[in-house]
């Protein structure tokens, strides 16, 4: 029996939307947006897309009309009553009503702000200017759109059998990882992994499949949740997230003096703690260099639940944190380190073994969880769908340039002169270049 | 959109038939049946199922009611007008009208004869008694039913995700083989592979998928066809096949004297050549020992197109044939050796390299093509779906026991005393036991 209606419907799609819900974004965008709304409702901030994998000429691959159609579609979205009820009623990090009535009222009328798109040197210049509380929301969805459009464009050349083999290979590969994680759990006793892969995902349906496979294959004791709010809601998973560089970057940009700039990273934490409980207090120490951040942190920073080293080698970054907590007289074994920078099964295994009993580790598994198609394309280049390193970062706030130094100078962002100024202010202790893969 | 009708239909199946067409069988059953009809229309012959993998207790795994329902359903089948037109109109081995009007008239009213089924020691005793021209047709379909029911029973314990991973693993594994075959083709220049896997297949849909993958992945120059008549018709592939042990076994059983018995294997060839052209003249030399067969063969046997060694190590068996052709003054490079005994990618590679330029090789790839799920089950025993060595062999003709010696004594069939008698008559030169895997 052919369902003629479905077939005709499938053949007459005007658009296959990539983002179909404003909830199809990361939990931390919501927790940050609430903070921005509360403390900086009038600050403006521009976000911009950057493809660090310059060998992949996105503007030659992704059709501009398609990209505009997807961005426009995302702009047409509103939160649905069901979604707002879930945001109001769901428990996040063990806490009810984490999102206040003011913020929920704001979301009720929220839509993504306008964008600016043009082609330049084979890449897309895609920027979002306006109120920070609005532009912040584009980050994840713009990236998800770009990544899925690129995958779709690549897959257009594949036959039905090739697509079949492609997904078979990817599923087989995913299952191998799940099996290794099970053995790792048996070996190390405790293993906590959550999904941070929305922005870099191969596509929404694959993301959803992977969440179901992780949930089924590992259970809630190991697979602790997803950063994706829509999938958390739809699949009954925990929503997971920390906070991002945009906070210290904007606080830094707004700082009037070098002295203010030096305090900016800790101001972020102060504001954060005014809204969020201990469970959600995870330091992101590397924005202007981890060594400087830790050396100058007020003592109360060491009381936070944990930290997320995001640009150092995970072992180095974790050892540095352990040493710092110990120095501060805190027990590292009670602290939580979130590893989320380009992790994959090998580095998960290595760090889980190394830090067993020494510190709690939570993995925020991103690109290599939701977009690992390396070696999976059956004919031609098997790596044609290998992920690219594309980011969407704040570039200015209230007209002043935003800067990230990072522990890895290859991940620095901002105008050159400003980077130099920040490096003078914060120093460069502990910074080291290493290749950015994803 | 849920297609409610399809969903309800799927949930109210009385039976999911394994065999849905009498054409869902091997080409050689038809070419043999035509010969049997022409020369031995009144001979009776009983076929019996034997599971050589005794560790797998089929009667404990496969429900008797389900087995009967599937066998009964197969018995209800008739050739459809479309199928008879295809048999009459299609070209087989380059020849039109290979099936004569008498035989096609016989098929028009043909149905599978009755069966006898009982459980014994955890296995099924399944026999088919009656006219040879009718019972012969059960072989492939009885085996396909048993193998698919066993797979279904095993898969009943799997969750939806596990089934998804199972087939992803199997597809990924199949594609790896196809890629290796492409490289092998590039290396050796000529590679000819056809499917002989109907009887041992995992299931009809998987069989069909594999035929499409082979056709797409290798093209007609390498993937030369399938023994399965229905898939040949439906997918526009060449139908491929040789002839089976049942011919010399029945001719042997019917022999009145030891002298007649010694001539029986060559009588088969004489009758075969009365119907079929050079293209289809492939010797199956091992029924009573290849060494004896070749040593006593009339000179004209060496004029046949090729041979199918079926129970020796493929290298040994092929070398023996090459030496024999050379001894007979024939050019082995022009001869065709069909390797079809438990071949898999490793042995295909090994033999293709070894015999490059020395003899033409055609692969009849069976079990490991259509039922390779070893290592594919995601949870529990990864080999739970590994194939079993189950056969359906003729055991008597006109009330006299049928015997196969084979080059491998572990593959001998028949009553012990008769095997002894045959061994006295034919000798045991060149026979050697080695493990039967599939």
Image: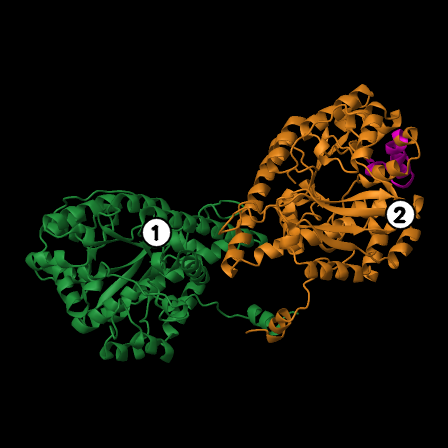
Chain colours: A green, B orange
Please report the residue visible at 45 percent of the width from the left and 51 percent of the height from the top: A175
Q: Position of residue A52 (x, y in %)?
A: 32, 50
A78 to B109, vertically: above or below: below
Q: Using the rendered view, name the quadrant where residue A89 is placed.
A: bottom left
Q: Position of residue A243 (x, y in %)?
A: 24, 61
Marks 2 and 1: in contact by CB < 8 Å?
Answer: no
Along the viewing direction, whichever of B175 and A48 lies nearer the viewer? B175
The tag on residue A389 is 1
Spatial separation of the CA atoms under disc 1 and disc 2: 72 Å
B13 left or right of B399? left
B321 left or right of A45? right
Q: Is residue B264 magenta?
A: yes
Secondary structure of residue under mark 1:
loop
- Image quadrant holding the N terminus of chain A, namely bottom right
Return the chain for callout 1. Answer: A
Along the viewing direction, whichever of A426 and A418 lies nearer the viewer? A426
Give the residue at mark 2: B44
Please report the residue visible at 45 percent of the width from the left and 64 percent of the height from the top: A66
Return the chain for callout 2. Answer: B
B170 left or right of B49? left
Q: Which residues are magenta?
A: B262-282
A123 left or right of A100? right
Q: How many tags in the picture?
A: 2
Please report the residue visible at 53 percent of the width from the left and 70 percent of the height from the top: A13
A218 to A239, vertically: above or below: above
Q: Magenta: predominant secondary structure element? A: helix
Is residue A56 visible in the rendered structure shown here? no
User: Which marked residue is nearer to the observer: mark 1 or mark 2?
Assistant: 2
Along the viewing direction, whichever of A344 and B320 lies nearer the viewer? B320
């Amino acid at each position: 029996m052919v369902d003629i209606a479905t077939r005709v419907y499938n053949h007459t799609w005007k658009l296959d939307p990539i983002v179909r819900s404003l909830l199809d974004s990361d939990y931390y965008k919501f927790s940050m947006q609430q903070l921005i709304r509360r403390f900086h409702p009038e600050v403006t901030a521009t976000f911009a897309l950057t493809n660090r994998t310059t060998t992949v000429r996105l503007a030659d691959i992704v059709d501009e009309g398609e990209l505009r159609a997807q961005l426009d579609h995302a702009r047409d979205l509103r939160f649905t009553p069901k979604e707002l009820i879930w945001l109001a009623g769901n428990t996040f990090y063990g806490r009810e009503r984490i999102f206040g009535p003011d913020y929920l009222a704001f979301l009720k009328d929220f839509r993504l702000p306008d964008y600016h798109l043009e082609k330049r040197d084979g890449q897309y210049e895609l920027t979002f200017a306006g109120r920070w509380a609005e532009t912040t929301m584009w980050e994840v969805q713009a990236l998800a759109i770009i990544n899925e459009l690129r995958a779709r464009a690549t897959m257009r050349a594949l036959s039905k059998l090739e697509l079949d083999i492609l997904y078979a290979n990817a599923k087989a590969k995913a299952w191998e990882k799940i099996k290794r994680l099970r053995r790792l759990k048996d070996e190390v006793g405790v293993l906590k992994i959550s999904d941070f892969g929305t922005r870099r995902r191969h596509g929404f349906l694959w993301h959803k499949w992977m969440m179901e496979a992780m949930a089924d294959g590992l259970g809630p004791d190991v697979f602790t949740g997803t950063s994706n709010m829509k999938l958390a809601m739809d699949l009954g998973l925990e929503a997971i997230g920390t906070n991002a560089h945009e906070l210290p970057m904007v606080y830094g940009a707004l700082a009037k003096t070098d002295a203010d700039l030096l305090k900016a990273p800790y101001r972020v934490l102060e504001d954060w703690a005014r809204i969020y409980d201990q469970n959600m207090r995870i330091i992101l120490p590397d924005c202007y260099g981890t060594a400087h951040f830790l050396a100058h942190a007020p003592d109360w920073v060491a009381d936070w639940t944990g930290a997320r080293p995001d640009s150092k080698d995970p072992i180095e970054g974790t050892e540095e944190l352990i040493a710092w907590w110990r120095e501060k007289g805190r027990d590292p074994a009670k602290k939580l380190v979130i590893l989320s920078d380009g992790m994959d099964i090998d580095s998960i295994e290595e760090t889980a073994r190394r830090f067993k009993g020494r510190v709690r580790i939570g993995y925020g598994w991103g690109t290599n969880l939701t977009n690992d198609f390396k070696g999976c394309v059956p004919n031609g280049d098997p790596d044609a769908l290998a992920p690219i390193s594309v980011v969407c970062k704040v570039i200015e706030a209230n007209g002043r340039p935003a800067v990230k130094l990072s522990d890895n100078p290859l991940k620095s962002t901002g105008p050159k002169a400003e980077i130099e100024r920040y490096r003078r202010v914060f120093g460069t202790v502990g910074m080291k270049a290493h290749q950015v893969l994803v």
